[in-house]
Image (tube, helix red, strand yellow):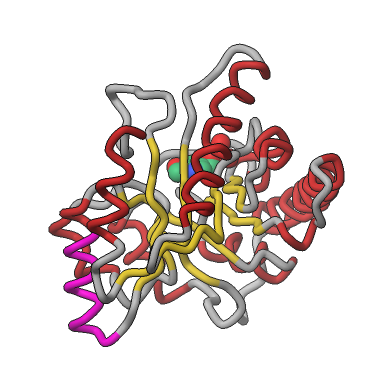
């Protein structure tokens, strides 16, 4: 880059660096409290609305996973991400008719909430000669306005999705309801962890419970204490989002 980096961008880099150090320490402390190692917690930077220069700066600090919410935004920024050093995830809702636009570009789709969607991911993955890692998104708070699988449907969905040739179930993801108290947050996280362990214990064919992805800027430490091993942090790293 020949042009001089703007002062704004340099200030943003400083902010991100300071935030990253704080988050890294908080993760280590929460992991320790949970009797786990900091290295066992996968940190994902949620990058919606964040410009590629800032994302790549975060990657230069050591971020190894980034997650976009929207297919359109992912595609528009795709050429600019430094993906040599990091994996790209889709963490937002995916419509079946957009699956072919992202398969092969992302290393994980975290927001799979139906057999229909999983089938389409498998079909498009087969066409691209890849296997796509997915997480099943659970609507743990049973919120009507949210996507995600209701727990009573999970067994059947697991059975059907695990039969698909070109997707690999790697764990569970959730975005719990906004809670007024930490006690309430823990309740949802603890329920997710129970579900995660129950499925692990069943040792289903083709079902790998490697990742429990939960916890965002406001509650990633609580999530880790409850058993999350992947947290998705946006605003605590990049500052408040500016929607254009
Ligand atoms: C935006 C987003 C995050 C990060 O949210 P913050 O509160 O900014 O940390 C995590 N997961 C998903 C699915 C998101 O959409």
Q: Is residue 129 left or right of residue 244?
A: left
Q: Quadrant of the N terminus?
A: bottom right
Give the image location of residue 4, x and y in percent: 66, 71
Question: In the current view of this chain or complex, which residue is farthest to the front?
Answer: 202
Q: Is residue 144 left or right of residue 58?
A: left
Q: Is residue 81 magenta?
A: no
Give the image location of residue 173, x and y in percent: 47, 46
The residue under the point 52% across, 64% down is 52
The residue under the point 67% across, 36% down is 226
Q: Is residue 128 magenta?
A: yes
For the stretch drawn in magenta, the main secondary structure is helix
The residue under the point 63% across, 45% down is 228
The residue under the point 27% across, 55% down is 159
Magenta segment range?
A: 118-129
Question: In the current view of this chain or complex, which residue is farthest to the bottom?
Answer: 129
Give the image location of residue 183, x and y in percent: 66, 16
Residue 160 is drawn in which quadrant?
bottom left
Q: How many marks?
A: 0
Depth check: give the residue in front, 66 or 43.
43
Q: Quadrant of the C terminus?
A: top left
Give the image location of residue 105, x and y in percent: 36, 74
Residue 18 visible in the snapshot: no
Asked if residue 36 is positioned above or below residue 206 in the image, the reply reads above
Depth check: give the residue in front, 188 or 13.
188
Asked if residue 241 is positioned above or below residue 9 in the image, the reply reads above
Residue 167 is drawn in which quadrant?
bottom left
Residue 147 visible in the snapshot: yes
Q: Is residue 126 left or right of residue 132?
A: left
Depth check: give the residue in front, 136 or 86.
136
Q: Is residue 155 left or right of residue 119?
A: right
């Amino acid at each position: 880059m020949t042009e001089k980096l703007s002062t704004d961008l340099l200030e943003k880099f400083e902010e991100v660096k300071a935030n990253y150090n704080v988050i890294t320490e908080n993760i280590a402390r929460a992991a320790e409290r949970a009797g786990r190692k900091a290295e066992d917690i996968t940190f994902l930077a949620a990058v919606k609305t964040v410009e590629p220069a800032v994302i790549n700066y975060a990657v230069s600090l050591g971020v190894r996973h980034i997650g976009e919410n929207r297919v359109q935004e992912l595609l528009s920024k795709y050429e600019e991400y430094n993906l040599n050093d990091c994996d790209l995830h889709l963490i937002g809702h995916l419509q079946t008719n957009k699956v072919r636009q992202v398969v092969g570009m992302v290393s994980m789709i975290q927001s799979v909430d139906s057999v229909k969607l999983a089938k389409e991911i498998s079909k498009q993955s087969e066409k691209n000669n890849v296997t796509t890692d997915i997480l099943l998104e659970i609507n743990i708070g049973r919120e009507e306005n949210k996507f995600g699988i209701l727990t009573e449907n999970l067994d059947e969905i697991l059975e059907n999705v695990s039969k698909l040739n070109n997707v690999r179930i790697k764990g569970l993801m959730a975005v719990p309801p906004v809670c007024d108290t930490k006690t309430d947050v823990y309740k949802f996280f603890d329920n997710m962890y129970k579900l995660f362990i129950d499925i692990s214990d069943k040792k289903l064919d083709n079902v790998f419970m490697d990742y429990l992805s939960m916890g965002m800027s406001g509650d990633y430490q609580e999530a880790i204490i409850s058993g999350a091993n992947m947290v998705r942090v946006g605003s605590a790293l990049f500052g408040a989002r500016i929607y254009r």
